[in-house]
C-alpha cells in the first residue's frame, strides 16, 4: 500500500517533469515542497502563535492592571509569563522570519526553490507539533512550565512540575526544526545563486539571513545540550546543576545564555535586512554603505558569542569576568550604530514617501534605537545591579522586539504582500494599523522604563502601591496594541481575497529580482536561472 | 522628540485616570539611594542616560529633518550618492570613543562594589521559598523574615496599607556607618537579594556564597524585594532593612539573644491542647500556609493537602520526620533548623487537630527534642 | 530539460510529515516513560507510543533515503544538487560539533571554576568555608561536596587500558575509511569492500569495549551517573559519543550494502563521503574525550 502512495506522490514528478501548479486540498499543505507554500504556512503559523502569545500577555497585563490579586493565582501567572516568552520567541518571531526567508530568498537570489525542499517541509511541520506539546502542558497535572522562558535551574529541574519533561522534548523539536531550516537557508544562499549574483551583490535581506542561519546552527545545538542536561538532572540523578554533587546552578545560566544572547540577534538581524530593503525603495535612493552594512552584521554576529554573561552580572562572577563582558557588550553598539547611521544616510536627500512599509521601517529605526540605548545602559555592569530583573529590562527587550522584530515583520508583510497575492492592500487601513500600533505599543512599554527604575521586579503577579499608575497605563496600551492586531488580520485576509491588482514592480523605487517576476508570483519561479549583470 | 510626545500623552492619561489617587506616589527615576556606591551608580546611570539622549537627539534630528525636507510630496528629487568611506570610519570611531568614556567610570564603580574586604559586621543571608533568613555570624543571632502583609489585603478584601508587600515580621537590623558584608546564598532555588537604596543586588545561589557589602550613612528603613524568579511566591518575599545607631543595634542584638534563651526556657513548660492550637495556628499561617494553604487544602499536585493527609493523621513519627527533616528535592524544607522546638511542637499539634484532622494528639517540645536526638 | 542544467525540485513528498509524526510520538513517548517511571506509575502505554514512533522513524528513514537513492541513481541530480548535499552535511556536522561543545564547556566550567569555588578557592572563599567545610577540591572528583546525597566513585577508569586501546581502534578506523575512500576513487571495489568492512569491524569492537567499560564502571567502580559531577560529565560525554559511533557504524553498514548492490562510482559517491566525514568527526571528538576526560 505504501509503495503505491509513494509512487502516486513522489514518482509522479519523474515522469512528468514539467512544472505544475499546486495540488488540491489538505494534501497540498501536508506534502508540499514548494518554498512559497511553506513560506505561507510559516507565516500563518507564526501569526497564530503571535495571537496566542499575545493573549497570554494580555492575561498578564490584566492581572497587573491594579495591585492585589484579582484574576489569576500566582502559579498561573508564572505559567503565563513563561509561555508568553517562549511562544513569542520560538513560535512567533523566529518562524515569521523563516517564513520570509522561504518566500524571499529563492526569489531574491534567482533560485527555483530552496536547496533541500523536502527537508524544508519537515522543518515546518515539526513546529505545530512542538507547540501543541508545549501548550498542552497547560492542561496536564501540575500545569505548564512556570520557571520563565530562561528556565533557570534548579527551579526548572529539582523544583519543576512534571511537565518539564515535555517542555524539554518540545524544545528539542524546535531545535531540530530551526537547525534544519537554517541549513536549508545557508545551502540555498551559498549554492543556488543565479549566475552573476556574487555574494556582494546579494540583497541585504539575504545577507542578514545568511548570518542569522549561521548563528542558528551554532547555538541551537547548545540549547539542545543544556535542556538535555536538565533532563538528566531531573530523571537520571546527575548533578550538572547541583552543588551537592559538584555541579553549579550558575553553569546552567552560562550555557543557556551562550545560546540566549545570539538568539536575540537571531530575532533582529533579519529585521535589519527587511528594513535595509525597504528604506532605499521609499527613499528612491540606493542603500548607503552597502559594504559596511554587511560587515556590521558580521561583526554583530561575531561579538554576540562573547557577551552572554551580561545577563548574569548579579550572579557573582569574578570581577575580571564582569569587566570583560561589560566591555564586549558595549562594543556591539558600534556596528549597530553603523547600521542606524547608514539607514539615516539613505533617507537623507532622498525622495521620501510614507507608505505602510516605510512607516513601520521608520518607527523601527527610532524605537529600536531607543531599545538599543536602554540595552547599552544595561550593559554598564554597576548600573545593571539596579536594573537587573526589573521592568527596565522588560521595557528594553520589548522595545527591541515589538517595534524591532514585530514591526520589521509587519513592514515586510506590507512590502511583499502584493507580490505574494497579486493584490494591493488597503493603504488607509494599513495607516490605521500603523498609528494605532505605534501609540498602543509605546503606551504599553514606555511606562515600563519608569516602573523598572522605580524598583518593580519582573515576573511578579502583584506589586507595591507606588507602581500602580504606570501599570494601569501599560495595561491600557497593551489592550490597544493587541486589539489593533485584529485589524491587521482583517486587512491581510481582505487583501488576499480582493483588492486592486498589483503591478510587477509594485513600488516605484523597488529593485531586485523578486520585482521582475509577475504579481502574484507564479507557483514556480526562476526554473531557469536569470542572468544577473 | 517622540518620547516627549509620549510623555505628554502619559501625563494626560495620568491626570485623567488618577487625579484622585494621591496616596500612590509614582517614581520616574532610579532612587539615588543613601550609600556612596548607590550614588555613584546613580550618577553613572544619569551620565549614560544623557549621553544616549544627546545621541538620540542628533540622530533622530537628522532623520526627521530628512522626513520633513526630503519628501517626494515636496518635490524632493533623490540624489544617488551611496558610499563614503570617510563617514563610515568617522561614525565607527566616534561612538567607540564615547563608549570608552562611559566604560571608565563604570569600571571604577564596579571595582569599588567588589571590594568586600575589612568588614565590621558579617551577615549570612539565605533565600528560602519564600522568605529570607539572616544569621549574624559570631553573634548567635539567627532568624527568618517573612512577608507580613495580610492575605486580606492581597485578595482585596481589606484596604491596602502604605507598605503593601514591602513589610516583614522580622526586619534585618544593622548599624550605620559600619561596613556590613553580606554572605548571600540560598537553600532551594535561586533568589536574589536587592535593596535599591544601597545598590546591592546579588543572586542567592544554592550551594554557593556570593559576597556583597554596604555602609549606610543614615538611620532609616530601606525596602527591597527578591528579584529572581523563585517559584509561586516570588513576588511575596520582600527585604526590609532597618539601619540604626550603634547603641541601638547593640541593644537589639542583646534582646535577640535573650529571646532565644527565653524560647529555650519555654520548651520546658507544657501546654494545653488549646494553647498549642493557638500558637500552632500562628506558626502555621506564617510558615506553612503559603504552600499548604490556611485551610489545609494545599495546591495539589504541587503542594499536598494536609487536611486528612495520611501523614497528618497517621503515625506521629512520620509526621515529625517530614516536618523536621523536610523532603529532599521538593519544596518541603527541613523545618527542624528553622522553628524552635516549641513552635515546632505547636505547629505539628495544630496540623494534627485542625480542619477536622481531630487526632487529639498533643505534641510537646520534649517530643521534638527526643525525636531530633534519635 | 536535462538534469544537468536545471535544479531538481522534487514535487510533493509524504516523507516529511511521516517523519514529523514519528519524531513526535518518539519524543512524547520517551517523555511519558520518564515521567511515569519517576512517579512509579505503569509505563506500558508510554513504551508503546515510543516504540510506534521509533518504528515510524525507521520506516521513514528507509523510505526517504531509499527514495533519494532512487532519484540519485536515475541521474536526476546535477552537480549543483550534489553541492547542496555537501553544504547540508557540513553544516549538520558543525551543529553536532556545537552540541558536543556544550558538554565540553560544562566539563571545563566545573573543573576550572565550580569545583575550586566549592572547595573555597578563588574569589568566593566563603563558599567552601561556610557551606562545605569538609570538601576538598580535586579533579577527578572522588568525594563530592555532599557525599550523603552523591556518594563519589571508588575508583576511575584507567586511561591506559581500554580507553587507550579504543583510541587506537578509532584512529585506525579513520585510516581504514580513508583507504576505502581512495579505493573507491580508484575504482578498486574489492579493496573498497575490505577496508570498509575493516572500518565497520573496528567501530563494532570499539563499541563493545565501550560497553565493557561501562559495565566495569557500574559494577566494580561505583562510577555511575549518580556519582557526582565526575560521573555526570564522564557518562554524558562518552555516552553521546558512543551514540554517535553507533549511528556512524550503522551508516557505514548501509554504505557496505549499497556497495554490494553496485552503487557509487568514482565520481559519484557523496553518501559514502558524507559517512566518512561523519566518521572522522566522531573520531576527532573521541580524541578530545581521551585527553580531556580520561587523561587530564
Ligand atoms: C531583538 C532582541 C534584542 C536586541 C537587538 C538586543 C540588543 C541589546 N541588548 Fe538586549 N535583551 C533582549 C533582547 C535584545 N537585546 C532580551 C529578550 C533580553 C532579556 C532576556 C531575559 O532576561 O528574559 C535582553 C537583556 C539584555 C541585558 C540583560 C539585562 C539584565 O537582565 O539585567 C543586557 C545587558 O547588557 C542587554 C544589552 C543589550 C545591548 C547592549 C544591545 C545592543 O545590541 C544594542 C545596540 C544598539 C544601540 C546602542 C542603538 C543604536 C546605536 C547608535 C545610534 C550608535 C551610537 C550609540 C552609542 C555610542 C551609545 N540586553
Ligand atoms: C518577540 C517577543 C515578544 C513579543 C512580541 C511580546 C509582546 C508583548 N509582551 Fe512580552 N515578553 C517577551 C517577549 C515578547 N513579548 C519575553 C521573552 C518575555 C519574558 C518572559 C519571562 O520573563 O520569562 C516577556 C514578558 C512580558 C511581560 C513581563 C511579564 C513578567 O515579568 O511577569 C509583560 C508584561 O506586561 C509582557 C507584555 C507584552 C505585551 C502586552 C505584548 C504585546 O505586544 C502583545 C500584543 C499581541 C496581542 C495582544 C495578540 C493579538 C490580539 C488578539 C488575539 C485579540 C484579543 C485582544 C483584544 C480584544 C484586546 N511581556
Ligand atoms: Cu525569592 Cu524570588
Ligand atoms: Cu544579551
Image (cartoon, coloured by chain):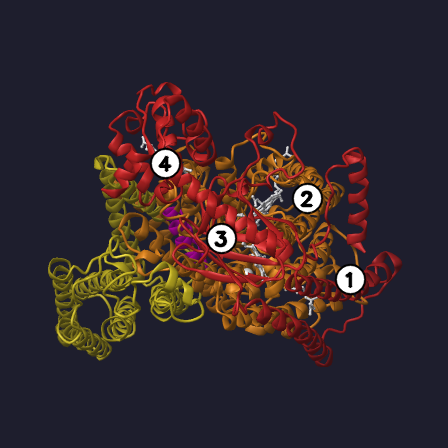
**Circle 3 chain:** A
Give coordinates of residue A196: x percent, y percent: 56, 73
Q: Which residue is mark 4?
A: B267
Disc 3 is placed on an element classified as helix
Badge 1 residue CB within 8 Å of ligand 1: no
Same chain shared by disc 4 and disc 3: no
Q: Nearer the viewer, residue B276 or A42?
A: B276
Q: Which residues are magenta?
A: A168-183
Residue named by callout 1: B60
Q: Which mark is residue A35?
A: 3
State the mark number for residue A444.
2
Q: Is residue A435 magenta?
A: no
- Mark 2 Cβ and ligand 2 under 8 Å apart: yes
Mark 4–mark 2 distance (CA, rounded to whole Å): 56 Å
Q: Considering the image in quadrants, where does the C terminus of chain A appear?
A: bottom right
Q: In terms of depth relative to the viewer, which is nearer, C272 or C107?
A: C107
Q: Colour of chain C?
A: yellow
Q: Secondary structure at mark 1?
A: helix
Separation (CA) of disc 4 from disc 3: 77 Å
Tell me the distance, in whole angstroms, between the alpha carbons under discs 1 and 3.
39 Å
* Quadrant in the picture for residue A246: bottom left
**Chain B's shade in the image?**
red
Drawn side of residue B360 relative to residue B102, left or right? left
Q: Residue at x 32, y 40 (%)?
A: B324
Q: Chain ID for label 2?
A: A
Amino acid at each position: 500500500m505504501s509503495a503505491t502512495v509513494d509512487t502516486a506522490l513522489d514518482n509522479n514528478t519523474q515522469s512528468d517533469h514539467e512544472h505544475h501548479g499546486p495540488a488540491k486540498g489538505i494534501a497540498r499543505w501536508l506534502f508540499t515542497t514548494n518554498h512559497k507554500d511553506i513560506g505561507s504556512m510559516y507565516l500563518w503559523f507564526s501569526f497564530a502563535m503571535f495571537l496566542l502569545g499575545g493573549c497570554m500577555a494580555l492575561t498578564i497585563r490584566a492581572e497587573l492592571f491594579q495591585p492585589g490579586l484579582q484574576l489569576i493565582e500566582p502559579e498561573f501567572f508564572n505559567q503565563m509569563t513563561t509561555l508568553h516568552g517562549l511562544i513569542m520567541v520560538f513560535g512567533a518571531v523566529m518562524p515569521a522570519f523563516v517564513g520570509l526567508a522561504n518566500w524571499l530568498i529563492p526569489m531574491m537570489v534567482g533560485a527555483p526553490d530552496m536547496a533541500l525542499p523536502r527537508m524544508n517541509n519537515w522543518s515546518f511541520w515539526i513546529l505545530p507539533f512542538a507547540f501543541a506539546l508545549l501548550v498542552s502542558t497547560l492542561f496536564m497535572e501540575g500545569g505548564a512550565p512556570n520557571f520563565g522562558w530562561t528556565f533557570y535551574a534548579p527551579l526548572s529541574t529539582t523544583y519543576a512540575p512534571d511537565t518539564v519533561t515535555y517542555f524539554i522534548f518540545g524544545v528539542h523539536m524546535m531545535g531540530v526544526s530551526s537547525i534544519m531550516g537554517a541549513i536549508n537557508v545557508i545551502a540555498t544562499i551559498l549554492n543556488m545563486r543565479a549566475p552573476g549574483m556574487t555574494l556582494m551583490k546579494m540583497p541585504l535581506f539575504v545577507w542578514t539571513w545568511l548570518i542569522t542561519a549561521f548563528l542558528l546552527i551554532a547555538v541551537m545545538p547548545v540549547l539542545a545540550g543544556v535542556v538535555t542536561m536538565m533532563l538528566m538532572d531531573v530523571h537520571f540523578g546527575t548533578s550538572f546543576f547541583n552543588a551537592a554533587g559538584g555541579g553549579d546552578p550558575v553553569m546552567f545560566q552560562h550555557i543557556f545564555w551562550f545560546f540566549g544572547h545570539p538568539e536575540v540577534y537571531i530575532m533582529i538581524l533579519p529585521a535589519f535586512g527587511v528594513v535595509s530593503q525597504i528604506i532605499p525603495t521609499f527613499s528612491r535612493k540606493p542603500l548607503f554603505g552597502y559594504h559596511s552594512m554587511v560587515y556590521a552584521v558580521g561583526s554583530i554576529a561575531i561579538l554576540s558569542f562573547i557577551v552572554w554573561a551580561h545577563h548574569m552580572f548579579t550572579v557573582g562572577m569574578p570581577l575580571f569576568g564582569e569587566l570583560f563582558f561589560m566591555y564586549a557588550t558595549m562594543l556591539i553598539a558600534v556596528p549597530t550604530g553603523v547600521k542606524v547611521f547608514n539607514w539615516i544616510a539613505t533617507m537623507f536627500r532622498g525622495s521620501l514617501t510614507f507608505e505602510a512599509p516605510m512607516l513601520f521601517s521608520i518607527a523601527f529605526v527610532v524605537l529600536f534605537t531607543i531599545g538599543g540605548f536602554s540595552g547599552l545602559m544595561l550593559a554598564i555592569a554597576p548600573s545593571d545591579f539596579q536594573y537587573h530583573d526589573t521592568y527596565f529590562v522588560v521595557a528594553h527587550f520589548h522595545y527591541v522586539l515589538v517595534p524591532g522584530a514585530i514591526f520589521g515583520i509587519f513592514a515586510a508583510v506590507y512590502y511583499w504582500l502584493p507580490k505574494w497575492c497579486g493584490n494591493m492592500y488597503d493603504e488607509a487601513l494599513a495607516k490605521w494599523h500603523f498609528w494605532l500600533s505605534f501609540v498602543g505599543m509605546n503606551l504599553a512599554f514606555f511606562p515600563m522604563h519608569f516602573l523598572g527604575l522605580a524598583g518593580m521586579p519582573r515576573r511578579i503577579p502583584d506589586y507595591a502601591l507606588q507602581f500602580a499608575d504606570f501599570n494601569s497605563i501599560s495595561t491600557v496600551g497593551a489592550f490597544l496594541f493587541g486589539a489593533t492586531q485584529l485589524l491587521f488580520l482583517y486587512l491581510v485576509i481582505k487583501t488576499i481575497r480582493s483588492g486592486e491588482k498589483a503591478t510587477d514592480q509594485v513600488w516605484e523605487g523597488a529593485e531586485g529580482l523578486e520585482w521582475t517576476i509577475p504579481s502574484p508570483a507564479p507557483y514556480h519561479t526562476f526554473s531557469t536561472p536569470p542572468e544577473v549583470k | 522628540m517622540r518620547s516627549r510626545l509620549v510623555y505628554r500623552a502619559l501625563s494626560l492619561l495620568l491626570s485623567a485616570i488618577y487625579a484622585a489617587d494621591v496616596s500612590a506616589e509614582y517614581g520616574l527615576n532610579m532612587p539615588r539611594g543613601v550609600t556612596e556606591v548607590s550614588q555613584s551608580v546613580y550618577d553613572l546611570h544619569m551620565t549614560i542616560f544623557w549621553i544616549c539622549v544627546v545621541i538620540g537627539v542628533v540622530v533622530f534630528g537628522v532623520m526627521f529633518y530628512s522626513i520633513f525636507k526630503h519628501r517626494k510630496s515636496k518635490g524632493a528629487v533623490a540624489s544617488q550618492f551611496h558610499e563614503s568611506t570617510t563617514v563610515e570610519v568617522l561614525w565607527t570611531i566616534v561612538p567607540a570613543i564615547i563608549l570608552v568614556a562611559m566604560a571608565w567610570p563604570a569600571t571604577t564603580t564596579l571595582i569599588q562594589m567588589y571590594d568586600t574586604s575589612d568588614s565590621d559586621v558579617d551577615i549570612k543571608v539565605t533565600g528560602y521559598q519564600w522568605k529570607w533568613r539572616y544569621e549574624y555570624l559570631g553573634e548567635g543571632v539567627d532568624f527568618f523574615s517573612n512577608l507580613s502583609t495580610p492575605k486580606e489585603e492581597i485578595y482585596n478584601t481589606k484596604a491596602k496599607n502604605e507598605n503593601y508587600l514591602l513589610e516583614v515580621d522580622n526586619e534585618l537590623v544593622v548599624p550605620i556607618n559600619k561596613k556590613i558584608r553580606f554572605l548571600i546564598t540560598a537553600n532551594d532555588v535561586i533568589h536574589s537579594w536587592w535593596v535599591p537604596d544601597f545598590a546591592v543586588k546579588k543572586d542567592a545561589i544554592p550551594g554557593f556564597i556570593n559576597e556583597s557589602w554596604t555602609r549606610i550613612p543614615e538611620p532609616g528603613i530601606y525596602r527591597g524585594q527578591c528579584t529572581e524568579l523563585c517559584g509561586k511566591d516570588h513576588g511575596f518575599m520582600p527585604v526590609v532593612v532597618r539601619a540604626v545607631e550603634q547603641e541601638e543595634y547593640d541593644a537589639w542584638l542583646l534582646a535577640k539573644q535573650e529571646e532565644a534563651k527565653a524560647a529555650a526556657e519555654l520548651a520546658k513548660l507544657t501546654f494545653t491542647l488549646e494553647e498549642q492550637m493557638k500558637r500552632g495556628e500562628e506558626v502555621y499561617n506564617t510558615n506553612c500556609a503559603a504552600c499548604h494553604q490556611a485551610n489545609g487544602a494545599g495546591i495539589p499536585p504541587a503542594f499536598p493537602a494536609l487536611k486528612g493527609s495520611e501523614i497528618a493523621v497517621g503515625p506521629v513519627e512520620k509526621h515529625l520526620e517530614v516536618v523536621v527533616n523536610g523532603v529532599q528535592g521538593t519544596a518541603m524544607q527541613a523545618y527542624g533548623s528553622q522553628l524552635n522546638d516549641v513552635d515546632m511542637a505547636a505547629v505539628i499539634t495544630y496540623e494534627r487537630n485542625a480542619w477536622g484532622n481531630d487526632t487529639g494528639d498533643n505534641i510537646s517540645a520534649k517530643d521534638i527534642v527526643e525525636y531530633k536526638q534519635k | 530539460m536535462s538534469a544537468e542544467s536545471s535544479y531538481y525540485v522534487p514535487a510533493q513528498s509524504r516523507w516529511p510529515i511521516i517523519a514529523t509524526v514519528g519524531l513526535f510520538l518518539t519524543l512524547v513517548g520517551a517523555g511519558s516513560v520518564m515521567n511515569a517511571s519517576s512517579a512509579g506509575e505503569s509505563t506500558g502505554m508510554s513504551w508503546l507510543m515510543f516504540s510506534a514512533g521509533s518504528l515510524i522513524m525507521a520506516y521513514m528513514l528507509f523510505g526517504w533515503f531509499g527514495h533519494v537513492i532512487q532519484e540519485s541513481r536515475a541521474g536526476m541530480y546535477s552537480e549543483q544538487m550534489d553541492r547542496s548535499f555537501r553544504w547540508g552535511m557540513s553544516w549538520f556536522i558543525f551543529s553536532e560539533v556545537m552540541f558536543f561543545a556544550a558538554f565540553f564547556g560544562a566539563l571545563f566550567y566545573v573543573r576550572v571554576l565550580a569545583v575550586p569555588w566549592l572547595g573555597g578557592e578563588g574569589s568566593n572563599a566563603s563558599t567552601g568555608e561556610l557551606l562545605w567545610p569538609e570538601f576538598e577540591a580535586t579533579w577527578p572528583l572522588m568525594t563530592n561536596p555532599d557525599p550523603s546525597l552523591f556518594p563519589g566513585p571508588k575508583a576511575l577508569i584507567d586511561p591506559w587500558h581500554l580507553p587507550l586501546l579504543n583510541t587506537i581502534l578509532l584512529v585506525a578506523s579513520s585510516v581504514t575509511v580513508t583507504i576505502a575512500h581512495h579505493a573507491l576513487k580508484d575504482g578498486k571495489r574489492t579493496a573498497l569492500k575490505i577496508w570498509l568492512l575493516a572500518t565497520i569491524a573496528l567501530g563494532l569492537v570499539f563499541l563493545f569495549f565501550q560497553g565493557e567499560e561501562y559495565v566495569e564502571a557500574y559494577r566494580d567502580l561505583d562510577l555511575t551517573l549518580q556519582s557526582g559531577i565526575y560521573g555526570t560529565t564522564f557518562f554524558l560525554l562518552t555516552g553521546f559519543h558512543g551514540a554517535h559511533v553507533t549511528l556512524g557504524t550503522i551508516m557505514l553498514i548501509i554504505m557496505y550494502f549499497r556497495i554490494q548492490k553496485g552503487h557509487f562510482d568514482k565520481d559519484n559517491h557523496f553518501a559514502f563521503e558524507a559517512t566518512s566525514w561523519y566518521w572522522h568527526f566522531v573520531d576527532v571528538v573521541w580524541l578530545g574525550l581521551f585527553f580531556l576526560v580520561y587523561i587530564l
